[in-house]
Image (cartoon, helix red, strand yellow):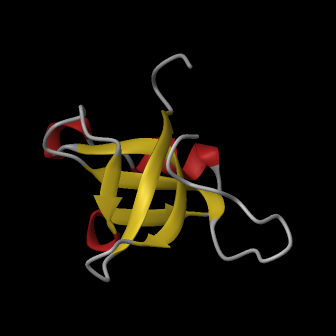
């Protein structure tokens, strides 16, 4: 993934299943307040609400931006192929 470098020993930035509030699905990073972490893929799919612009996804994070925000980066929307 471009822009994120993973240190496998630190466990600071990890991949998670989540429901992401995304008014435009063209974005690939989201502030922490738009991401609700889920315990697994099925829970994320079940909690998604496309009509409310809340979509199931795999995300990587949290990572600090230069402005001090905690961001999550999109790995994959769960209802779409890779």
Q: Is residue 46 above or below residue 21?
A: above
Q: Residue at x 34, y 51 (%)?
A: 29
50 or 30: nearer the viewer: 30
Question: Residue at (22%, 46%) from the top-left corner?
Answer: 22
Q: Please, which residue is most extreme toward the top here?
A: 81
- Where is residue 53 drawn, in percent x and y? 19, 43
Left or right for 71, reference 21: right
Which part of the image, by quadrant, shows the C terminus? Answer: top right
The residue sitting at 31% across, 78% down in the picture is 69
Residue 79 in the figure: left or right of residue 67: right
Residue 55 x %, y %: 34, 42
In the figure, residue 25 lies in which quadrant? top left
Which of the image's four quarters has the N terminus? top right
The residue shown at (16%, 37%) is 24
Q: Nearer the viewer, residue 35 or 45?
A: 35
Above or below: residue 32 compared with residue 5: below
Quick one: which residue is furthest to the right in this view?
9
Q: Position of residue 72 (x, y in %)?
A: 43, 60
Q: Is residue 64 left or right of residue 55?
A: right
- 44 relative to 53 in the view: left or right: right
Could you tell me residue 21's position as x and y percent? 25, 53
| Total tally of numbered discs in the picture | 0
């Amino acid at each position: 993934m471009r822009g994120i470098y993973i240190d496998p020993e630190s466990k600071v930035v990890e991949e998670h299943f989540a429901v992401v509030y995304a008014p435009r699905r063209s974005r690939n990073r989201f502030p922490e307040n738009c991401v609700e972490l889920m315990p697994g893929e099925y829970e994320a799919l079940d909690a998604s609400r496309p009509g409310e612009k809340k979509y199931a996804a795999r995300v990587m994070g949290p990572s600090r931006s230069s402005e001090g925000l905690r961001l999550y980066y999109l790995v994959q929307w769960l209802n779409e192929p890779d």
